[in-house]
Image: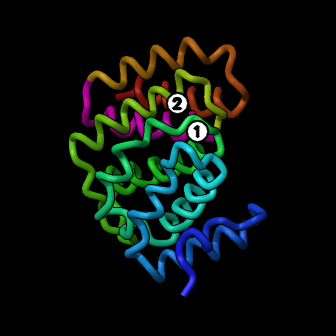
Amino acid sequence: MPNLLAQINYAKAYRANRLAGAQWVIEHPETIPELIDYVYLENQKEITHKAAWVLEFVVIENPSLLYNHLDLFFERITFPEKEQTVRPLANIAEKLCLAHYKASKKHSKPPLTAAHKEILTEACFDWIIEDKKVACTARAMTCLYLLGTEIEWIHPELKVILTQKLPSGSAGYKNRAQKIIEKISSR
């Protein structure tokens, strides 16, 4: 039987390869902690983004598979710096926030604890301040907006940062930032 590393250590980053790896993990959910460990390996930079891409596809297909491993997922989410790894983590974070704060009949609500929310808040502010690519920052904005509906200090801080960075942002950044600023202002 093939192991997890064989499933995620594909030569080409084709979507089909990522989907195949994710499908294998879905069929072997006991490997999710190991997959998360690969996402956060510090000395294996080539495998981290591949693992993150596979985890992203797993969460898209069946988000509840991650719910029992949220402590492990969040404990090191601020560590990766490589854009290829951060982008899928930001996507996963956004999906978790949307599922947690928005009612959904399709999926169960992820059990985000106060500690998870604190770590996620830190990670999202870092992604915005560090000028990650728009795919990361836009997702971070959404997470922070949703977290800010519960945690009072987030919206004022987020609005200040977005307003300051708006003039120099890309078109995608400006679009999302303006929408988030409008939502904050109308609350």
**Residue at image location 65% in from the left, 65% down from the top:** 9
Q: Amino acid at mark 2?
A: Trp
Residue at the extreme bottom? 1
Residue 28: percent from the left, percent from the top? 45, 80
Task: Name the side, left or right, on which 151 lies relative to 90.
Answer: left
Viewer-proximal residue among 46 and 187: 46
Q: Amino acid at mark 1?
A: Cys
Determine the image quadrant of residue 168.
top right
Residue 66 within the magenta-colored segment of the rendering: no
Q: Earlier in the sequence, mark 2 or mark 1?
A: 2
**Which region is colored magenta?**
135-152
Q: Badge 2 is on which residue?
A: 127
Task: Name the side, left or right, on which 29 lies relative to 114.
Answer: right
Residue 119: percent from the left, percent from the top? 33, 36
| Picture mark count | 2
Q: Give how far apart the Cα atoms at labels 2 and 1 are.
A: 7 Å
**Residue at image location 72% in from the left, 29% down from the top:** 171
Figure check: 74 above or below 184: below
**Residue at image location 44% in from the left, 48% down from the top:** 93
Residue 141 within the magenta-colored segment of the rendering: yes
Determine the image quadrant of residue 169.
top right
Indicate how the structure is coloured in the image. rainbow
Mark carried by residue 136? 1
Most prominent secondary structure in the magenta stretch?
helix
Residue 30: percent from the left, percent from the top? 38, 75
Viewer-proximal residue among 25 and 124: 25
